[in-house]
Image (cartoon, rainbow, N blue to C red):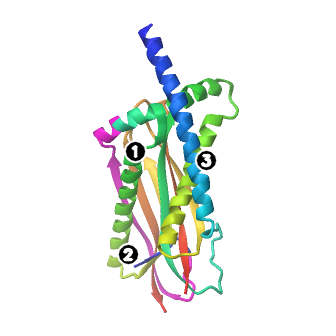
Amino acid sequence: MADLIVFLVLLASGYTVGRIAERRHYRSILAREKELANVMVFTNRFPPLTLRAGQALVAGSVVISEDYFKRVLSGLQSLFGGRLRAYESLLDRARREAVLRMKQEARGKGAQMIVNVKFQTFSIPGRNPNSFGAVEVMAYGTALTER
Amino acid sequence: MLLSNLEIVPGQRIVKHLGLVQGSTVRSKHLGKDIMAGLKNIVGGELKGYTELLQEARQEATERMIKQAQAAGANAVLNIRFSTSSITQGAAEMLAYGTAVVLAA
């Protein structure tokens, strides 16, 4: 009985706090994406060849943890297979946050664009071998500052 | 030392190619941070302690790569890539690698 109560409390707090945090994070992501829209991001391997620019390696990374509700939900969903919506939004947030941090660093260096952007995702293993735990997303590229 | 993940440097010529240079470091989780992360695992959100830990590790790997490039006599490392792998539970390896070159204006 005590176990069940603990489980329900964890589930409820994961659901409410996790949801509020996710909404707040999305709001902040959207606001900052608008603010940093003038730093352009390209996945091209080569910079515009006519551009005379200084360059610097820039990177942004973030570690985001799932909440208890997402863990239980995805555990149930993975019985049936298919989309795990709970994790899709988690990774979307992480990836956009990483790009924003990279852009922030580039703007701090006075750059107007970032080329050859690469993503890297690393799932941090939890103590419990079958738990998902947290995921790190890193974005990196070369920032170009026009001279 | 110029660091870039491009293969070329606009306006500069590569006069010497010195081969692959790399730097890596293995880091494990800090117990205090791990406990905090365990709590954060319930409500979700960013694990700031881990973000910093991994950034520091990456910085260290990059510095080791730079040292190797300097020892080879390079003034730039191009086409830099990062890679992360988990060795055992609670430990991760950060690797940075690239091509050491000599650039001339």
Q: Chain of mark 3?
A: A
Left or right, residue A20 beside residue A42: left
Q: Which mark is residue A26?
A: none
| Residue A38, image quadrant | bottom right
Q: Amino acid at mark 3?
A: Asp
Residue bounds of the magenta highlight:
B7-35
Q: Is residue A65 above or below residue B65?
A: above
Q: Which mark is residue B87?
A: 1
| Residue B16 can be seen, yes or no | yes
Give the mark nearer the N terminus: 1 vs 2.
2
Q: Chain of mark 1?
A: B
Q: Quadrant of the C terminus of chain A?
A: bottom right
Left or right, residue A48 beside residue B62: right
Q: Chain of mark 2?
A: B
Instruction: Give the CA distance from mark 1 to mark 2.
Output: 26 Å
Q: Amino acid at mark 2?
A: Ala
Q: Is residue A39 above or below residue A138?
A: below
| Residue A37, image quadrant | bottom right
* Element marked by disc 1: loop
Residue B71: where, in percent of width, then height? Answer: 32, 77
Residue B1: where, in percent of width, then height? Answer: 39, 79
Do circles 1 and 2 both sit on a common chain?
Answer: yes
Q: Nearer the viewer, residue A108 or B55?
A: A108
Q: Which mark is residue A92?
A: 3
Instruction: Give the CA distance from mark 2 to mark 3.
Output: 36 Å
Residue A136: where, in percent of width, then height? Answer: 49, 48
| Residue B79 can be seen, yes or no | no
Which of the two discs, 2 and 3, sits closer to the camera?
A: 3
